[in-house]
Structure formats: structure tokens, C-alpha cells
Amino acid sequence: MHGTENPSAWLQRWAHLITPHSRVLDLACGAGRHMRFLAAQGHTVQGVDRNPDAVSQAQTYGQVRCADIENGPWPFEGQTFGCVVVTNYLWRALMPVIVQSVAPGGVLIYETFAAGNETVGKPSRPDFLLHPGELLRVTQGLHVVAYEDGFATLPDRFVQRIVAARPKTAGDLTRWALKAPTDFAQAAP
């Protein structure tokens, strides 16, 4: 079942940017691999997924809602989070809501499949593949700390990923600490 593998290496690399003891939302959380990782770091985690079996497993790590966020109402209306995590999920209609859900001083950690993936596997439908630079465009107004758009291996895939922070206040000059890829544990995507 999706969500039982190791946490994303991208999340592990950038989790240090999440303010200690933050409320974190894991969107399309599956069985809770990221919830488990972030709860172990002391964050209060919430997840949402439409699969009741996945939600049942993920509830071990925090509060989880079973909801169809593509066809139903956004279950977190008016709420913001110290971090919003999205991996291996794309529903373009939700992008503005996802960005708005990042609290002042919070971060968005997003990683999913990109155009080109259709040449190496699934997903292959254009609806589920980011266009070049798409995450940069949808996060305008946030401070981009890190961004990648390219080919990754093990397994072979085209990905786009971003870490973008919402300033605490206008003109905020927070220094976002960078970590080299070798500074974190290697994990599956």
C-alpha cells in the first residue's frame, strides 16, 4: 500500500526548515510514511487521503481525515499549517488552496512526477505530470528555498520538487538553512 515505504529523501533533506512543534498537513498521506517521520520529530501531524484502508493505518501517527479532496469540499477550510507536505500527488485545481494553507513562517515541501515520466513509466497521463517550471509558477509569493526539475533513478522517474516558505511578515529576511544531499539519510522516493 502507498505510504508504507520510507519517507521521501526530499522531505528528509528539508524537514529541518519546519519550525519545531509545528502543525503539519500531509496531503494524500497514504498509510502515513511522512506522518510517521514528522511525528517522530515532535510535530503535530494531520493527514488526508481518500482511501479508508490507508487512513486506518495512518491514524497511528496523528489525526487523519478520509476525504475525496478532488470532488468534495476542502476539509481544512480556513486552517493554515507550519508545513504542508505533498508527494506523488497532483490535482491542479487544489494548487492555490495548498499554497494558501502554508502559515506565515511555514514551508511547503512538494515533490511529484513531471513531464517526461511518460517515457519511463507511470503515471503517464499529462493530467498527473507537472509542466516545466509549474511548481515555481504556483508558488509565486513564497520564498523558494530549493527547486529541482529533472530525472531521478531508483526507480527511474522524472520529478519536480520544491521547498517554498511563506515569510512571517512583509520584508522578512529569514535565513533558510541549506543542507547538502549528503547531510541526510538516503531513502526511497
Image: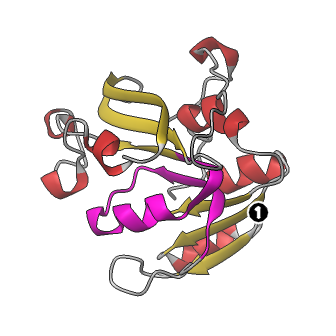
| Residue 82 horizontal side relative to residue 167, left or right | right
Looking at the rendering, which quadrant does residue 66 occupy? Answer: bottom right
Q: Residue at x 72, y 34 (%)?
A: 16
Q: Is residue 160 visible?
A: yes
- Pointer 1 residue: 61
Give the vertical position of 34 relative to 145 (above or below): below
Give the vertical position of 70 relative to 185 (above or below): below
Circle 1 SS class:
loop
Which portion, as a residue range, is magenta?
79-108
- Colour scheme of the picture: secondary structure
Give the vertical position of 188 relative to 5 (above or below): above
Q: Is residue 42 magenta?
A: no
- Quick one: 14 or 143, which is closer to the camera? 143
Q: Amino acid at mark 1?
A: Tyr
The crowd level at tag 1 (other Cα within 10 Å; few <14, some 14-19, many 20+) is many
- Quick one: 179 or 57, which is closer to the camera? 179
| Residue 11 horizontal side relative to residue 20, left or right | left
Q: Residue at x 59, y 38 (%)?
A: 11
